[in-house]
């Protein structure tokens, strides 16, 4: 029926009511072991496609793939875990500077820890302490600045928590 009017008079809506259905709250999922990775995403196919383009002769600017941020390089030096893998770009395999894996964590419940590079040994402790957060592992070459996301996954016990208060610093 084109041109049909609403039977509700103008301005009769309850204040604060948008008229849309309210979103349903999601129940926390049942987690058997909080430190066990779930919702794992591996980026190996994406890495293979980039490397195939490089070795296949596609024209590329060296800055396109070897563009690690200075903060990522610093995190690789101080928080990275040394791997046995050589860099796929500069192929430094003499043990001088192998690839580093840097672990970052993100999540609303982490508070001031969100977005920080951490030691992977702390992940099981954090998984018991926080409800849910995402972990990203990035491989970094400190020689040629190659970097690529290796994997991401979720950790935590699934129980929603409030964001912890921001720690006091010297200015507070």
Image (tube, rainbow, N blue to C red):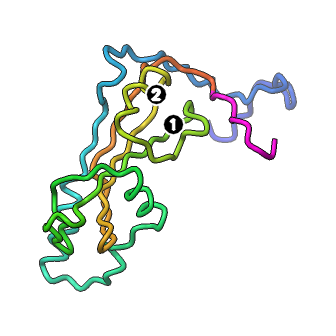
Circle 2 packing at 10 Å, graded few (<14), some (14-19), many (20+), is: many
> Which mark identifies residue 132?
2
Residue 55, image x and y in percent? 13, 77
In this view, the residue in front, 117 or 42, is 117
Quadrant the C terminus occupies: top right
Would you identify the image quadrant in which residue 74 lies?
Answer: bottom left
- Label whose residue precedes the other's in the sequence (2 or 1): 1
Crowding at label 1, few (<14), some or many (≥20) Cα neighbours within 10 Å? some
Query: In this rendering, is residue 95 above or below 106?
Result: below
Q: Which mark is residue 122?
A: none
* Occupied quadrant, residue 76: bottom left
Measuring 39% from the left and 41% from the top, which residue is drawn there?
Answer: 119
Q: Quadrant of residue 126?
A: top left
Which residue is identified by label 1? Answer: 107
Q: Position of residue 80 (x, y in %)?
A: 35, 51
Q: Residue at x 30, y 29 (%)?
A: 38
Label 2 with label 1: CB-CB less than 8 Å: yes
As for residue 167 lying within the magenta part, the answer is yes
Query: What is the magenta segment's predominant secondary structure?
Result: loop
């Amino acid at each position: 029926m084109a041109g049909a009017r609403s039977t509700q008079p103008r301005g009769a809506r309850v204040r604060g009511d948008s008229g849309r259905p309210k979103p349903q709250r999601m129940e926390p999922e049942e987690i058997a072991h909080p430190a066990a990775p779930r919702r794992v995403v591996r980026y190996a196919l994406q890495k293979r496609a980039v490397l195939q383009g490089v070795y296949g002769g596609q024209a590329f600017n060296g800055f396109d793939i070897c563009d690690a941020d200075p903060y990522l390089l610093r995190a690789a030096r101080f928080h990275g875990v040394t791997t046995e893998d050589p860099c796929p770009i500069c192929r430094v395999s003499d043990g001088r500077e192998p690839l580093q894996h840097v672990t970052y964590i993100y999540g609303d419940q982490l508070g001031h820890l969100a977005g920080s590079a951490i030691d992977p040994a702390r992940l099981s402790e954090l998984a018991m302490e926080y409800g849910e957060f995402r972990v990203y592992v990035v491989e970094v070459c400190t020689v040629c600045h190659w970097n690529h996301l290796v994997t991401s996954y979720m950790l935590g016990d699934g129980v929603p928590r409030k964001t912890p208060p921001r720690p006091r610093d010297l200015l507070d």
